[in-house]
Structures are given as C-alpha cells and as structure tokens.
C-alpha cells in the first residue's frame, strides 16, 4: 500500500510539472501567430486555428526529439528567429491585389509553407550527414559561454519591455514567482517541494484571477486600445473563434507555393535557429545533470529539428521550430530534469490543440504574465552559459579577449541592425535581391548567432594548437568526459565541475 501511495504521488507530481511546461511554452505559440496572422489578412478564426496547429506540431516535435533526437528534456516549439523572413514574405506585396482577406491569407500561408519545407532540408542535411558533428567537435567551454549565455540574454527585449505594457499585472507576476520559488520553500520546509515545483501554477493562477477582477471592475474601460489588448483578460478573441474540436492535418491550407528566394531567406533563419538550439541543448544538459553533450548527439538533434521544420511546413504553422529557451529555464526553476515530464507536456500540447475551446482558455493568458516568466527563465539559461566559465582560465588574456569581444559584438551588432531597421524600414543590407537581404539581416540580428560565430572563430584560430591554450579554454574537460567513460553513478561523477546532479531530484 505504501509503495502504491508513493507511485501515485510521483505520477501526480509528474503530470503537474508537465502541465507547467505546457503553460510556459504557450507564450511563444500565441504571440507569434497573433503578430503575423492579422498582417496576412486573417482574423480571429484563422489566428486560433494557426495557434492550435502550432501547438499540435510542437507536441509531435517534442516527442520526436525526446525519443529519437538528443533525448534531452527540451521542448521544441515556435521560434522568433523565423519571424523576420516570414514577415518579409507577408510584406512582399505579391497578393495585395487580392481583395478577399481570407484568400490573401491562404495565398500567403501557402507561400510560407513552401519556404519552410524547402528550408527544412538545410538542418536535415547538416544534422544527419554529420557536418554539424564535425563542427561541434571544435566547440570548447570557452566558445560555448557566449553561445549559451546569449541564447538567454539575447531575448531580453521579450522580457521587461512586455511586462511594462501592463505593469500592474506583469510586476506582481515577477514578485509572486520569486516569492513562491525562492523564499517560501526556505520558510515552509514541510511544503518545500510543493512550492519549489508548482510556483508557476500558483503565481499564474493568482495574477490571472487578479487581471480578471480588474477587467470586471472596469479598470480598463475607455483606455487606450493597446492597453486594453495587453491588460484585459478577455481581449485575445481566441475563445470565441476557436472551434470545439479541430484536428490539424497536412496541407490543410492548400498546396504549398515554392519560391527560391523565400527558401534561401528561410534557410538563413534555419541556420540561426540551429546555432541557438545548440546553445539551448547545452543548457538543458547542464540543468538535467547530464555529461557534456557529445557532438554526434548535437548533430542528431539538429537533424530531427530539421524534420520538425518540415512538419511545420506541411501542417502550416506559419513558423519554424527551435529548442525552447523558456522551458529549459523552467528545468532550473523546478530542479527536475526529467524527460518523462517533457513527454507529458507534449501530450498536453496535442490534447489541448484538438480541444479548441479549452486550449484557447489557457492561450488567452495576458502577455505581461508570460513576459514576467521570461524574465526568470531567460536569466536561468544565461546563468548556465556563465557556469561554463568554471572550466576556463579567466585570468588568461586570451580568454578575456575572446569572451569580451564576442559578448560585445553579440549584443552590439544585432542592436545596430534593429535600430537601423526601425528608422529606415529595412535592414542595413539593402540590395536589389530581397532574399540576399533577408539572409544577412536574419543572421546578424541574432545575438547568439553573432556571438557564437565570433567566439568559435577566434577560439579555433588564436594559438589553438598551444597546449596551454587548450587548458585555458577548458578543452581538456569536455574532451575527457564526452566519451562517457565516467559512470554517472560513481563518486567521481558527482565531484566533476560540470554536474548539478546532487541538486536535482529525479522523477
């Protein structure tokens, strides 16, 4: 009887943790279609259907990655990296002569589908052919620090700037999440596990209810339209537009339209997503208390991510996929790096995407609440990158130069591209070829990609054959333990610098 009680308790806890991962990944799945669909001519009905399709395919991709890819506890969801080339396709003015908004939406969607299907071949070839394995072999802890850190910090514009759009909702969410996850567990030791692992549900429920009462009380009547959209709990339009039951299926929007220029633009986004996902996989391995990810596993994960982009294309999600940074941050917050939890969250994605009305209720969480979660989770991922410094000799001037220069360029170059675009209406690269412009603008607008390219190149060229440099860059640690010769159950494993096993309970 006692063993049955323990099993039931653990099963319930696992389901709750999986549901939290589902709630966290909803933010990206809702924000991207909500921004893109109206510009294509779609209304609330199309927006709700695209969100459901994106969630459905994210569930499939997460299951495939956890069973066949890296097998790390990572959620594979929507990516902001693909927004720029998608927006370029939408604003290309090819279908402005179509007066019916629904037909214009369908034409644009089919063109985006063709670009995603073509771009998926890039990661499939790079991953399964072993090319990325050969590249990742030269990745050291030193060059991985800017990559992983800026995979989190590089998304800073999605954090507090969105919290401030409705500060009376976003700020309480941050405060409550910090209290529930960091302070209460130390004062209520008997309930420590409850607050450690369920802080997301408690904080979101309280703030969401608070936003609902503010809406009912008329706090946002006659306010600016943008304020109402961000603050009101009934402004998303998803619940009314979502069907009760909808099962997404391939080519539901029609046959894809292929265009070479669109394909190359989307391939550039696929390249940036590949680099960002590599950093996210490394962070996930840290928080899951695994040994450093072998290059062959990273390459296999990239290949399956390419298959994921292919599924995004044939189903019509309007977006590619990448490893979810926010869900990796949740691994650190809950201290549970279990693949089973991630698989359960994938089941929630598939289940609620088919039950439209119920899924739309959760998808209507106000934006500032989601942005408040990003402030915590993106910071956790950044800390995973900084944690790799323990392998490096930070007193070495070679190390200082590579770190400082790559960090600065990773933040400064994308900022220049963003500022130029906001003023001029187009990126700094502005030639007669739209696809060439998109390719360079996408790559150099990604902080993690710029930092990774700079750090990787410098680390592999500046005195790279010097034995002392190998020790300074931490190469000897990863070269030794990537071979998996160390038994994870041994005392030696628990004494290694890279492991967090002693802090992470398993489920």
Image: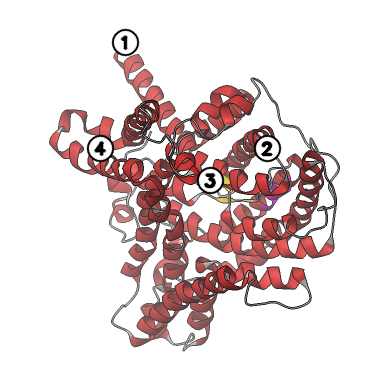
Mark nearer the N terminus (1 vs 2): 1
Residue 1's tag is 1
Between 487 and 212, the residue placed more toward the observer is 212
Indicate the secondary structure of the residue bearing disc 4: helix
Q: Nearer the viewer, mark 4 or mark 3?
A: 3
Residues under labels 3 and 1: Cα distance?
43 Å
Q: Residue at x 37, y 59 (%)?
A: 384
Q: Nearer the viewer, mark 4 or mark 2?
A: 2
Q: Main secondary structure of the magenta part?
A: helix
Residues under labels 4 and 3: Cα distance?
24 Å
Residue 43's tag is 2
Indicate the secondary structure of the residue bearing disc 3: helix
Q: Image quadrant for the C terminus? A: top left
Q: Where residue 359 sits in the image (x, y, percent)?
A: 55, 27
Callout 1: 10 Å neighbours few (<14), some, many (20+)? Answer: few
Q: Residue at x 61, y 73 (%)?
A: 424
**Range drawn in magenta:** 306-310
Residue designated by label 3: 28
- Residue 136 sits inside the magenta stretch: no
Q: Where residue 304 sits in the image (x, y, percent)?
A: 65, 49
């Amino acid at each position: 009887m006692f063993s049955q009680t323990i099993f039931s308790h653990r099963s319930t806890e696992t389901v709750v943790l999986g549901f939290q991962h589902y709630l966290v990944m909803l933010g990206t799945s809702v924000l991207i279609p909500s921004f893109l669909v109206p510009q294509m001519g779609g209304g609330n009905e199309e927006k709700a259907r695209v969100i459901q399709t994106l969630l459905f395919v994210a569930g499939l991709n997460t299951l495939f990655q956890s069973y066949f890819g890296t097998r790390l506890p990572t959620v594979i969801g929507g990516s902001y990296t693909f927004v720029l080339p998608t927006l370029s396709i939408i604003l290309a003015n090819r279908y402005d002569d179509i007066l019916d908004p629904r037909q214009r939406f369908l034409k644009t969607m089919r063109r985006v589908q063709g670009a995603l299907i073509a771009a998926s071949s890039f990661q499939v070839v790079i991953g399964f052919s072993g090319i990325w394995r050969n590249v990742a072999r030269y990745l050291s802890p030193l060059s991985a620090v800017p990559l992983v850190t800026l995979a989190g910090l590089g998304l800073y514009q999605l954090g507090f700037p969105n919290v401030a759009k409705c500060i009376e909702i976003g700020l309480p969410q941050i405060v409550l999440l910090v209290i529930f996850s960091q302070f209460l567990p130390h004062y209520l030791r008997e309930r420590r596990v409850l607050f450690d692992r369920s802080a997301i549900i408690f904080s979101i429920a309280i703030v969401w209810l608070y936003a609902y009462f503010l809406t009912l009380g008329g706090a946002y009547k006659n306010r600016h339209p943008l304020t109402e959209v961000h603050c009101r709990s009934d402004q998303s339009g998803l619940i009314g537009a979502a069907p009760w039951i909808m099962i997404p299926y391939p080519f539901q929007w029609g046959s894809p339209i292929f265009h070479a220029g669109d394909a190359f633009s989307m391939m550039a986004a696929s390249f940036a997503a590949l680099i960002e996902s590599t950093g996210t996989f490394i962070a996930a391995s840290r928080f899951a208390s695994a040994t450093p990810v072998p290059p062959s596993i990273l390459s296999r994960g990239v290949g399956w991510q390419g298959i994921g982009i292919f599924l995004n294309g044939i189903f019509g999600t309007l977006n590619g996929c990448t490893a979810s940074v926010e869900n990796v941050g949740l691994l650190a917050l809950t201290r549970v790096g279990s693949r089973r939890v991630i698989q359960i969250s994938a089941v929630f994605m598939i289940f609620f995407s088919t039950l439209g009305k119920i899924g739309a209720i959760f998808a209507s969480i106000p934006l500032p609440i989601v942005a408040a979660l990003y402030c915590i989770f993106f910071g956790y991922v950044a800390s995973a990158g900084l944690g790799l410094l323990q392998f490096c000799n930070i007193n070495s001037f070679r190390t200082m130069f590579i770190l400082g220069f790559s960090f600065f360029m990773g933040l400064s170059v994308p900022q220049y591209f963003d500022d130029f675009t906001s003023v001029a209406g187009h990126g700094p690269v502005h030639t007669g070829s739209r696809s060439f412009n998109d390719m360079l603008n996408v790559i150099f607008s990604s902080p993690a990609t710029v930092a990774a390219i700079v750090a990787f190149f410098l680390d592999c060229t500046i005195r790279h054959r010097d034995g002392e440099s190998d020790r300074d860059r931490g190469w000897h640690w990863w070269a030794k333990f990537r071979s998996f010769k160390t038994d994870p159950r041994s005392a030696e494993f628990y004494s290694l610098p890279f492991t967090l096993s002693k802090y992470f309970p398993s489920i």
